[in-house]
């Protein structure tokens, strides 16, 4: 999940860089918003899964 979040954020970053240097952006405002929201959602899912794995490992050690 973290790789997906990183890839989506990379797409957003490339789009912003292209827009700032005057090149044609391939995403509009709504597209950028959807990419950022998707990236955040996948990042949160990855963090929650990581915390679950750590908690499970800690509980099994006891």
Image: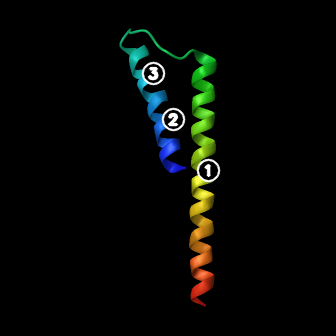
Name the residue carrying label 2: 8
Say which element carries label 2. Answer: helix
Quadrant of res 37:
top right
Residue 62 percent coordinates (x, y): 61, 90
Name the residue carrying label 1: 44
How many numbered discs sit on the rendered protein? 3
Check whether the beta carbons of the residues at disc 2 and disc 3 lie within 8 A of each other.
no
The residue most toward the bottom is: 62
Quadrant of res 36:
top right
Say which element carries label 3. Answer: helix
Query: Does 56 sit above or below residue 4?
Result: below
Among numbered discs 3 and 1, the one appearing first in the sequence: 3
Residue displayed at 61% across by 61% down? 49
Query: Does 15 sit above or below residue 6?
Result: above
Among numbered discs 2 and 3, the one appearing first in the sequence: 2
Among numbered discs 2 and 1, the one appearing first in the sequence: 2
* Residue nearest the observer in this picture, 56 or 21: 56
Query: Does 32 sit above or below residue 7?
Result: above
Mark nearest the camera among 2 and 1 is: 2
Name the residue carrying label 3: 15
Query: Does 14 sit above or below residue 1?
Result: above
Check whether the beta carbons of the residues at disc 2 and disc 1 lie within 8 A of each other.
no
Say which element carries label 1. Answer: helix
- Residue neighbourhood size for the residue with mark 2, other residues' Cα within 10 Å, grouped as few (<14), some (14–19), many (≥20): many
């Amino acid at each position: 999940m973290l790789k997906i979040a990183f890839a989506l954020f990379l797409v957003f970053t490339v789009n912003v860089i292209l827009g700032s240097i005057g090149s044609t952006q391939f995403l509009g405002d709504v597209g950028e918003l959807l990419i950022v929201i998707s990236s955040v959602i996948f990042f949160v899912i990855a963090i929650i899964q990581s915390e679950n794995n750590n908690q499970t490992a800690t509980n099994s050690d006891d």
